[in-house]
Amino acid sequence: MMEMPVVDSTLNLPMRRKRKASIHDLSDLDDDAGEDAKSTKTDENKKQNHSEIEKRRRDKMNTYITELSAMIPMCHAMSRKLDKLTVLRMAVQHLKTIRGAVHSYTEGQYKPSFLTDQELKNLILQAADGFLFVVGCDRGRILYVSQSVSKVLNYTQADLLGQSLFDILHPKDVAKVKEQLSSSDLNPRERLIDAKTMLPVKTDVPQGTSRLSPGARRSFFCRMKNRVPSQMKEEADTTTGCHRRKTKLNSDKKFSVIQCTGYLKSWAPSKIGLEEHEETDSDSCNLSCLVAIGRILPHISTVAFGHTSNKTRPIQFVSRHALDGKFIFVDQRATLVLGYLPQELLGTSMYEYYHNDDIPTLAKKHKIALQTSDHVATNVYRFRTKEGGFIRLQSEWRSFKNPWTKEIEYVISKNNLVLSDFRLVESSAGKAENIPENYDFFTSRK
């Protein structure tokens, strides 16, 4: 009988162990793969979270930049959208301006230590020969006025305190003063001017984002009503009824030209001293006010006779005229010379104010100025003032052509007050004829 070979069972042990080892290895690989997948998902989640965080941060930054640009006057004056760096640069410049203005008026720097605030205010009012007033920008209410207003307008402090400024303004000047109290019009120093046409550039300022800029300077002329002093009223009462009625009518129509110079400022009502007059609205917690000095405009004869020296610089004002001679721009200095406010002259023809004897010569000069681009100097002529008399002016005219259309757009006039042998010509001595507004001087006078 054949013997079967004995096979050692231990030979299969390594193979079994190998199989067992491979099973363990596979399980380890599966675990590693699972961990890698988890780590990949975690990294993706981290990246996604980081992207969301960055997006939220960018959105917040854009929101803050937009709010900041709305608060800076120079930013919303630009028609194009500004980049972030430009907005930040303009914000820094604006803050430096405000900080410089605040530092220049800090206690101990703008006044000597031995002067009290009341003494300093009295000195300023005496030097300015005017009165200090504070007007709320929202309704034009007079929040404060100094006692020196009685010397200028003959009102007492109690008469004007709490009243509306518009009640004592000339009706034609109300719109001009409202414009000065509003923030929609830019600060004159920051108004954009076209270099070619020298006209203000219309800026796209959103109505909702326009804000009052603290420290924005304001300077303008307006007419304020005079009040007859009590002494003059008593004297008028002793006269006849007819004369008393005429005196009253003349006094009601009497206005003084006041030059107002000041700035806009945000002020809390508690600092003004009118808490009892404040109304319970949401805007009463912070008021935007115009703080200004009002000075009466000196009479033209006083100004002229006070500068009779040949060495002094001549008084000059600039005006722009349409082709037919109508005023389209008048410098504020014209008020000092002519007595008219700029808004009174706008839209009227310059020929309405010339002396009748000077019109033919001026019409010829006007025609030459429209035919050439050179400077055309006029002879000395007479211009009718608001008081009814005539002063002597000499002008230099130059036509401005649009560089694109090559057409004349307007005439620039530099007007100088002639001080030598100055005298006011009475209106009765040489009263100009009533001249139609659309009168053609070129076809009728040759």
Image: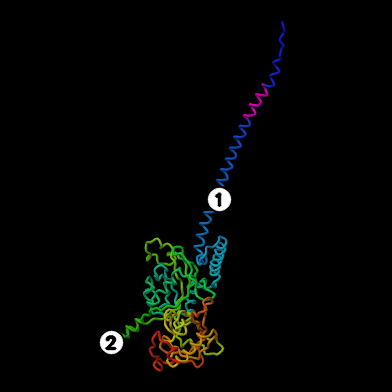
Q: Residue at x 46, y 86 (%)?
A: 300
In the rendered structure, which segment of residues is drawn in magenta?
A: 16-27
Q: Position of residue 238 (x, y in %)?
A: 29, 87
Q: Please say if 276 is above or below 347.
A: above
Q: Position of residue 112 (x, y in %)?
A: 55, 73
Q: Please say if 433 is above or below 154.
A: below
What is the secondary structure assignment of the residue under circle 2?
helix
Residue beneath label 1, please?
54
What is the secondary structure assignment of the residue under circle 1?
helix
Residue most toward the front?
1
In this view, the residue in front, 300 or 27, is 27
Can residue 146 be found in the magenta stretch? Answer: no
In this view, the residue in front, 414 or 179, is 414
Quadrant (top left, top right, bottom left, bottom right) of the N terminus: top right
Q: Position of residue 206 (x, y in %)?
A: 46, 64
Quadrant (top left, top right, bottom left, bottom right) of the C terminus: bottom left
* Mark 1 closeness class: few <14, some 14–19, many ≥20 residues within 10 Å: few
Which amino acid does the dot numbered 2 rest on? Cys
Can residue 24 be found in the magenta stretch? Answer: yes
Residue 250 at least partly seen: yes
Which amino acid does the dot numbered 1 rest on? Glu
Residue beneath label 2, please?
242
Q: Position of residue 328 (x, y in %)?
A: 45, 79
Most common SS among magenta residues: helix
Q: CA distance from mark 2 to mark 1?
A: 83 Å
